[in-house]
Amino acid sequence: MQLTIREEGSLENVLDFYRLLNLDLLFMEGYKKEAYPKIIILKDEKDLELLSLSNIIAVVIWNNEMSTYTTCPIFSMHKIEQSLSQLASVITTHLDFKC
């Protein structure tokens, strides 16, 4: 399910809505500075600033050269389907994080 919120609300208001749906997992975009686990996507060098964010659990890269910039688990966007089980494993190790 994908929902788009047109007006920017507080993260807590958005999470209150999703809590009603009793989801096992929720991916959200646009709350980089919040203290929740993050998977970041590095397309090119201008995205390297994202590595300074807190709570990064994995990095998805478009270019293999980007792998030298992090020690986090790395997944190639070009092979993401083959890596889904490994990515799921990384995510499930962080499921004890409570919102």
Image (spheres, rainbow, N blue to C red):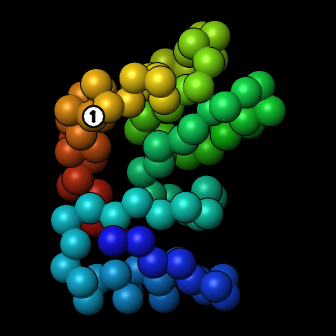
Q: Is residue 37 visible?
A: yes
Q: Is residue 48 visible?
A: no
Q: Residue furthest right?
A: 46
Task: Say which residue appears at 19% left-offset and 65% top-offset.
Answer: 24
Disc 1 designates what residue?
A: 84
Give the position of the N terminus as an image quadrant: bottom left
When asked about the image quadrant of residue 69, the answer is top right
Q: What kind of residue is marked 1?
A: Leu
Task: Say which residue appears at 21% left-offset and 55% top-offset.
Answer: 96
Q: Position of residue 56 (x, y in %)?
A: 48, 40
Q: Residues within 10 Å of mark 1 (few under 14, many from 20)?
A: few
Task: Say which residue appears at 64% left-offset and 85% top-offset.
Answer: 6
Side of 67 where 15 appears, left or right: left
Tally the numbered discs.
1
Q: Position of residue 48 (x, y in %)?
A: 71, 30
Name the element at disc 1: helix
Task: Say which residue appears at 20% left-offset and 45% top-offset.
Answer: 92
